Amino acid sequence: MAIPQHISIIMDGNGRWARQQGKIRLFGHKAGKETVREVTTECAKIGVRYLSLFAFSEENWNRPADEVKGLMELMLKSMIGERDTMMKNNIRFRVIGNYAHLSETLLEAIRQLEADTAGNTRMTLILMLSYSGKWDLLQAARRFAADTLAAGRELPLDEDTFASYLATAGIPDPDLLIRTSGEQRISNYMLWQCAYTEFWYTPVLWPDFRTKDLQQAIDEFNKRQRRYGKVE
């Protein structure tokens, strides 16, 4: 069985899960944190090299202020609390997204955890935080335009060059994208990088997602033929 080199997950359904329990939405986000730990540990165990998790989109800043505040506090606590788990499992940690919206306290926690885990080599865990695909494309275009202006001439541009300006530069494109909760859309996520990604959707809400569901997704991935536009 082939293990995808890069698995990406849109972690959806925390709010609906909380409502089913008669709780506020933040209760679902806290429950989802336990799933993150389980899935991350399992991915490292089976040989996944990159695991990226869509934790918070740029559009999510439009949610109620109390929920956003609670989510950011949960992110901060998680980064502090999960350090030992990442070190024990030899996992490197990275955050990708628009840092302009993040508090200095959260940014400091991100920098510290990234520095502490920089030497880990088993797997890279990438938290997509305050991220959107359109933002990524725009910031890449702006950076390339700035380099062109600085050079004073038209610079050559191909797909590999443009990809080097994306926030995910140096990270292979996702082989498998999993979305929980039954929604079947990409939600402005890694628009360039998912051009040839295999998509797998499940009705399972994120707090209920378990390693058996992860294995089901990988099994389905292995049944597919990835032709990249070619003919068999």
Image: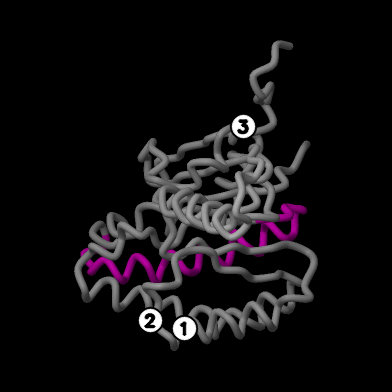
Q: Quadrant of the C terminus?
A: top right
User: Is residue 197 located in the magenta-colored stretch of the structure?
Assistant: no
**Residue 176: where, in percent of width, then height?**
60, 40
Label 1: few (<14), some (14–19) or many (≥20) C-alpha neighbours in 10 Å: few
Label 2: few (<14), some (14–19) or many (≥20) C-alpha neighbours in 10 Å: few
- Residue 157's disc is none
Please tell me in which quadrant of the rendered image residue 221 appears: top right
> In 3D space, how far apart are the residues under numbered discs 2 and 1 (Cα atoms)?
6 Å
Q: Is residue 10 above or below residue 56?
A: above
Q: Mark 1: which amino acid?
A: Lys
Q: Mark 2: which amino acid?
A: Glu
**Residue 183: where, in percent of width, then height?**
36, 40
Considering only order in the chain, which callout, 2 or 3, is on the residue closer to the N terminus? 2
> In 3D space, how far apart are the residues under numbered discs 1 and 3 (Cα atoms)?
35 Å
Magenta stretch prevailing secondary structure:
helix
**Residue 6: where, in percent of width, then height?**
67, 48
> In 3D space, how far apart are the residues under numbered discs 3 and 2 (Cα atoms)?
36 Å
Q: Nearer the viewer, mark 1 or mark 3?
A: 1
Residue on which disc 3 sits: 220
User: What is the magenta range?
Assistant: 21-50
**Residue 126: where, in percent of width, then height?**
59, 62
Residue on which disc 1 sits: 77
Q: Quadrant of the N terminus?
A: top right
Residue at the spot 54% in from the left edge and 54% down from the top edge: 210
Residue on which disc 2 sits: 73
Q: Tell me: 221 left or right of 104.
A: right
Residue at the spot 40% in from the left edge and 73% down from the top edge: 100
Q: Is residue 117 above or below residue 128?
A: below
Give the structural element (helix, strand or loop) at label 1.
Answer: helix
Residue at the spot 50% in from the left edge and 61% down from the top edge: 128
